[in-house]
Every structure is written in C-alpha cells, then in structure tokens.
Image (spheres, rainbow, N blue to C red):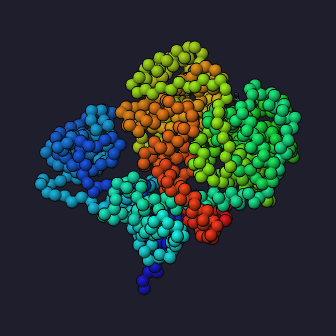
Amino acid sequence: MPAPALELHHSIITLKGVGPAIQQRLAKLGIVLIQDCLFHLPNRYIDRTQIRHIGSVVAGEVVLIQGEITQTHMAYGKRRQLLCHISDDTGGLVLRFFHFTHRQKNQLLPGKTLRCWGKVRSGRQSLELAHPEYQMLAKDKEEALDKTLTPVYPATEGISQFKLRALSTQALHVLRDDARGLPELVPQHILKKYTFSTLAESLCYVHRPPVDADTDALLQGRHKAQKRLAFEELLAHQLSLRSLRANIKQKQAHAIASGRPPAIEQFIAGLNFTLTQAQARVIDEVVTDMSKEKPMLRLLQGDVGCGKTVIAALAALYVIHAGYKVALMAPTEILCDQHFTTISQWFAALAIPVVLLKAKQTEGQRQHTLNRLTSPQPLLAIGTHALFQEHVSITQLALVIIDEQHRFGVHQRLTLMEKGSTGNHYPHQLVMTATPIPRTLAMTLFAELDISVIDALPPGRVPINTTVLSNRKRADIIQRVDNICRAGRQVYWVCASIENSEAVDLEPAEEIAALLTDSLPARRIALVHGRMKSSEKEQIMQAFKLGEIDLLVATTVIEVGVDVANANLMVIENAERLGLSQLHQLRGRVGRGAYESHCVLLYKAPLSNMAKARLSTLRDTHDGFLIAEKDLQLRGPGELSGSRQTGLPVLKIADFARDAEQLPLACDSADDMLKNTPETANKLIKRWLNYHHDFVTV
Ligand code: ADP
Ligand code: MG
C-alpha cells in the first residue's frame, strides 16, 4: 500500500531524516509543520558559480578563488597553524588552518592548484581565508563550477545546512502535490497591480533559484521574488497592527479628568528646572488622550536625554490623582532603580507612594509590594517585566508606561495590556523610546500607535564633542582618561559585547579592563558586563553613580538610560561594529552635566567606506532623528541584525532598510484588504504572525 500523501500542515517529523531529536532542534527555528520549512527562507546564497580574481577580493567577502600554491609553512603562535600561500595572475593571499591533519599538510605543496571557498579577512601581512573549504585540482583539467546559487539557511546548533537543504527539498515536493495547502492570500488584483508572482512560485524560486536567475539581485536580497515575499510579510504586519489598534480602541478605559489639580502645579513648581515647550506639548497630548473613555495608545519618541522621565511622572500623577494605579515598566533593574530613586524624590513632597518590584528582593519586601498592588490605594509601581508575571496582579490599573520600548516585543506589550485589563476595560498605554525614527516611517511601523515627539533638548546642554580614532591611538586616550579622572570627573569605556561567535576579533571587555588597570594603577576601575548577575551589575553601577569608581569598563549593558552627570568622557571600542542609533544612545550617557563632554569612537583599521561614512555621521550630527535616518540609509544589504538596535520591529524576512519601497505598497494593500476582504486579511496575519494570533482578530 502506498504511503499516504503528505500535506503541508503535517508535522515536520513526517519528513525523511527527522526524528524526535531533530524535531526539537527545528522547533527552535520555528519549524514545526512542513509548511514552516517553506517560510524558513535562505538568508544568503553561496555563489560558487564563478571564480573571482584574487586581486579583486576584499575583506568581508565570501568568495570562490582558484590559484597555485607558492609556499606552505607552519607558524607557532598561541596555537600551531598551517599557512599556505596561493596566487593567481592578479594577486595572492594566505590560507590559514588551525586544525589540520598530517595528510593535509603533506598534500598542500607548492605547485599544486587549489580551488578554495571562504570568507576573506585582513591578516597581519595580507588578506587571508581562515579555514577555507578547498578542493585540489588536477593539472590542466577543467573542473566544472556549480550552475546555480546554493541557498544558505539560518541554522541552529545540531542542524546542518545539508539537513536544511534536504528538508526544504522535501517540503517543496509536498508543496507541489498539496498546492491547496498553501492558498494564495494576496488578492489577484493586488498581485497584478505590482506584477508579483504567486506565493508558491516565489517560494520555489528563492529556495531553488534557477540557472538563469539574476544572481546579483538574489545575493543582495533584491530579487523580485524576494521582494514579493517581503511585501507579503510587511502586509501581514500592517494588517495585524491596524486590526490590533481597531480592537483595542473598541475597549473601554477609565477617563482621567484633564483639569490641572493643585498637585500637578505643586509638582511642576517643585522641579529644579522648567519644562520645555516640547515637554509641555507632549503632556497636553497625553492628558487629552487619557481624558477619553478609549484606551490611549501613544508612542513618545524623544532623543536620549530630552527628558522623558518627567513626562512619565506627570502622566502618572494625573492618573493617581484620579484614584487609579500606574505601572511603569523598564527593561533593566538598573533603570528601574534609577526611576524609583528619581520619581520617589519627586513624589515624596506630594505623599504619593511609589513601589518597586524586582527580581532581587527579600520575600518579605516582595510580599509587601504585592499586597500594595492589590490594595485600594492609588500608587505608582515600577518594575521590570517581573511586574507582569502571572502571579502578580494589579487592581485598578489605569495607565501602563513602557520605557525604552525597543527592548520589548509587540508580543510582550500585548500580554501586558491583557494583564492590565479587567473585563472590557483596558489601561491607557504610553510607550517611550529614545530611538527616534523619521515620523512618516514611524507612522507606518507603529501603525497601532499615535505619536508624540519631544524634538528639543533642555536648554543649556553643551554638545558632546565626538572624535573618531584608530585604536592604535589607545595609549593617548588612556593618558586623557588619567587627566580627566585627576580632575575629579568620571569615564565610561565601552566594549562591544560579543554576541556572535564569529566575531572573535572584538576586543573583549576583560582584556581592556586588564590593560587599563595596568596602565592606570592610581585609578579606581571596575568592569560590568552582561554575563554578571544583576545584583553585581547594580552594585557597580551604584558605586559609579556615587563616584566611588573613576573608570567604568562596560559592555553595551549601559546603553539604556543610566544617568551619571559627573561622567564626561566616553570611549567606545570597535565603534565600527555598532549600529549608529546604538552609538548615539551610548554617547547620550555623557553630556548630562554642565561640563563639556567628549566621546571617542575607536575603530579597528582598516575601515570600509561605509563604516567611514557611518562614523563621520555620528561625529558631525547630534540629532537623533537624522542619525536614525542615516542608520537606515547606510546599512549595507545583509546587515539584517541591526533592526533590534534601531528600535524597529523585528520581522522574519523583510528588512526595513532594504525593503523600504515595499512599505507604501503594503499600507495601501492593507487598507484595501481590511475594507474588501477582512476574512482573508485575518488568514494572512495568522500565516505570518501566528505567535500572537490570539490577540489579533479583524
Ligand atoms: P531621557 O529622555 O533620555 O529618559 P531623562 O528623563 O533621563 O532623559 O532626562 C535627562 C536629564 O535631563 C535628567 O537629569 C532630567 O532631570 C533633566 N531634565 C529633564 N527635563 C528638563 C528640562 N526641561 N530642563 C532641564 N533639565 C531637564
Ligand atoms: Mg530615559
């Protein structure tokens, strides 16, 4: 009896080569059903269809080259290595092997011809390929090249490219036999209008590009088939945000009186600064929203240091005065502590209670806080996402404020709204972000939110003097650090954290800390990094705030919101590796006091033209909006990981920089579908965003 035909909605385990262990690993990639395999798209391709001239390759490229071995020798550094020099008519480079067999060593002899595949990097003397794949060629015998691009899939531990290719091949076969399993959901007239092919055709194309495919376009992610898929995802994203908004706006909220109670006047009078015009305007917008019986959904964008905290406090004050509770959620404990200290001081004079809920608390403290959250007394509760864990309940919650929104996903925000709801009542929501993005783009990306902008810094800020230097100048900078500390000021030294294992040549924070400790014996130096326990981190940050530490070496954990006015120099290592918006955020940690502040961006030579342009933008510009815009423009194709840092939503395949031109099409089509085919719209949302389909109904 023939085996029953497979269908796209069957479990992945029904495919050949998948047992329970592989099934579990695939689940980590979001692959559960056969059809998930189809949406697990290649994030790049290997081009082994042509051989590059060695003289034309540059660091960072992944290339296929062919040449003759001129010399092979061993090197004895920290580790034993085999170095093999090869060249063609245009130039030469070095193959570097850390692991090699006796046989390999005897094989790689001068005069032999090799075809190699690998990533080019700049070595000490010349360009290198570290651990290339290679193939020994017989003299004078033509060796055929691959005819099509080979897809490379996002992988996970224990799943090889070979396996992923085998699975996508099977999934494509199932698609062919079960075409109805993956219906076309984009209406025909829309496909026609933009000359897009069907979903099934586009998927087949990107998984297995045909021989005559436009290789360059595919490698850059700009092929029409890729655009078609990005379009569909952006469309699904638009649909989900719009229906989310519509859904929430149908709910009830507690209307908060917009008249100014005396407590507000007292609060404002008690501040040691005057609110800027921009701050006053934003407060008006927030108060007007909250005076309605519909939940507020407002995003507050404002450059780092523009004074968003006081807006949060004021909004909270209105709501507390009206007899309700407010929750303020921040992404790190350090930030929660800081908000707690600042706002408690502000609210003390008004006798308004502020409570803090965090992971590191005694059971007694915790219980006390939990009791307060359900007591009838209005208050402000500050916490990390611990605030919204299952066993925590908050009664009479009328406003939720989220600081540094880019650290939370849409999904987390939704859970939070649900959590704050009672019956048909939802809390008002104010979402704050320091990663400003151009307004029109923001309106599209955060289509579910209304947008307020603080577009001016408080008066009297001295702009931060930014310089870009090679890290060979590190010794000079260390001298400068010494001078600054002697004058009683403090310094941050930031090292890009090691997030992916490929980036082995980042200066690890520990090494830098050791170097600085050696060079500056008279200075009090401490290191904070992401792998420390949060209690340890906090202790160090606290000591830095109190001036007990002169020089703080840190990974990017300090990025968000920490306020130490006495620090007026920041040094950033490997600045060329960080996103512009992230650098701008980091830099915003200094320049908070009255002293002139400096930021030194150290880079590791050589710098690509793109990196040069990026760093000069940062040197010459202090406007977060402009920087964010440049960040989008100057991100090269393939630099997909940047989105988390820029505060843009993280999508599966579409990229907001590369696919920007698809956005208006997606917006128009979303309007069209919501009006004419809402049922299909819902299916499309589920296809692409199934992780939160519980929340989204059209
Ligand atoms: P961010 O928007 O980055 O969260 P903060 O709220 O931390 O900024 O504010 C940065 C600093 O500016 C704080 O020390 C705050 O007290 C101060 N500040 C806020 N508003 C004003 C203002 N209108 N005038 C002067 N200083 C202000
Ligand atoms: Mg802040």
Q: Is residue 381 visible?
A: no
Residue at the location (52% across, 35% down)? 583
Q: In terms of depth relative to the viewer, which is nearer, 507 or 73?
A: 507
Instruction: Give the farthest residue toward the left.
Output: 140
Q: Quadrant of residue 511?
A: top left
Q: Quadrant of residue 277?
A: top right
Q: In terms of depth relative to the viewer, which is nearer, 530 or 628?
A: 628
Residue at the location (76% across, 48% down)? 289
Image coordinates of residue 231 in percent, x first then y, are 51, 60
Image coordinates of residue 120 in percent, x first then y, are 31, 43
Q: Is residue 659 visible?
A: yes
Q: In terms of depth relative to the viewer, which is nearer, 499 or 310?
A: 310
Residue at the location (46% across, 80% down)? 4
Residue 358 against residue 681 in the figure, above or below? above
Residue 52 against residue 597 in the figure, above or below? below
Q: In terms of depth relative to the viewer, which is nearer, 185 or 590?
A: 185
Q: Quadrant of residue 551?
A: top right
> Horizontally, is 382 left or right of 446 in the view?
right
Image label count: 0
Residue at the location (59% across, 52% down)? 444
> Horizontally, is 443 left or right of 279 in the view?
left
Residue 179 against residue 309 in the figure, above or below? below
Image quarter where the C terminus lies is bottom right
Residue 393 against residue 86 in the figure, above or below? below
Image quarter where the N terminus lies is bottom left
Image coordinates of residue 265 in percent, x first then y, are 84, 32
